[in-house]
Image (spheres, rainbow, N blue to C red):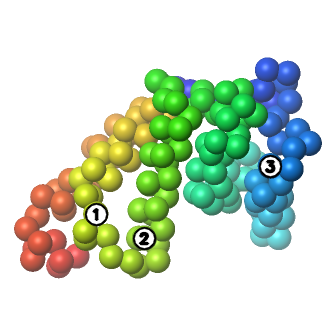
Amino acid sequence: MPTISSGSASNGRSPFDYDDSSLDAQRRVVVNAKRSLRQERKIETPSRIVAECSFSFWVALSARRYDAMLWRSTLHRAFAPTPSRKAAFGQLDRLRTLRNRIAHHEPIFFRNLHADYDRIGRLLKMMSPETARWMQHHSRVPSTLAMPTAQATQF
């Protein structure tokens, strides 16, 4: 399974160690995540910091402005097989849009939900095959999408 360790850039430094103003917004997210954990009196572990960062934060790290600094040096290793940065960003951004529509209770009925679900499965399989298998086994989305509309609205 692909992993990203801290300090995994070729020179041993974390991408967040670079003095680059393009990372300022992302640094603030990480600083705020750590602050939130301290306020909740939780230990700052990498897993907790990751969980505190929004999905938009992670999608933004695959944007063009981070191609050399983050994607080529480190982030591409989170995917196997490795897609192009542009393809990864496009797929992740479509997923971010879907997530935002759902989170803000906006209608998603006119979307191609089968394609959205397939996209989630493909991305997940590239990042964590084990989690993708779990999702495939436990997800009720395919059976819900297969229901006639009247029956599906009973949920």
* Farthest top residue in view: 10
Taking depth in this image into account, of 54 and 116 the one nearest to the observer is 116
Name the image quarter holding residue 36. Answer: bottom right
Q: Earlier in the sequence, mark 1 or mark 2?
A: 2
Q: Are marks 1 and 2 in contact (CB under 8 Å)?
A: yes
Reading the image, the residue beneath label 1 is: 111
Q: Return the residue at label 3.
A: 22
Q: Report the side of 74 relative to 107 (left or right).
A: right
Q: What residue is rendered at 44% in x and 54% in y?
A: 94
Name the residue type under label 1: Arg
Left or right: where 80 falls relative to 52: left
In the picture of the structure, the residue carrying the numbered disc 2 is: 101
Q: Is residue 1 left or right of residue 23?
A: left
At which x and y percent is residue 127? 49, 35
Residue 103 spot, x, y in % from top left: 46, 72
Q: Residue at x 70, y 43 (%)?
A: 65
Secondary structure of residue under mark 1:
loop
- Spot occupied by residue 131 in the image (x, y as percentages of width and height): 42, 40
Residue 34 at least partly seen = no
- Along the line of sight, the residue nearer the viewer: 68 or 53: 68
Q: Is residue 115 above or below residue 5?
A: below
The residue positioned 67% from the left and 35% from the top of the image is: 67
Q: In 3D space, how far apart are the residues under numbered discs 3 and 1 (Cα atoms)? A: 33 Å
Residue at disc 3, secondary structure: helix
Up-down relation of residue 109 to residue 71 (above or below): below
- Whether residue 106 can be seen here: yes
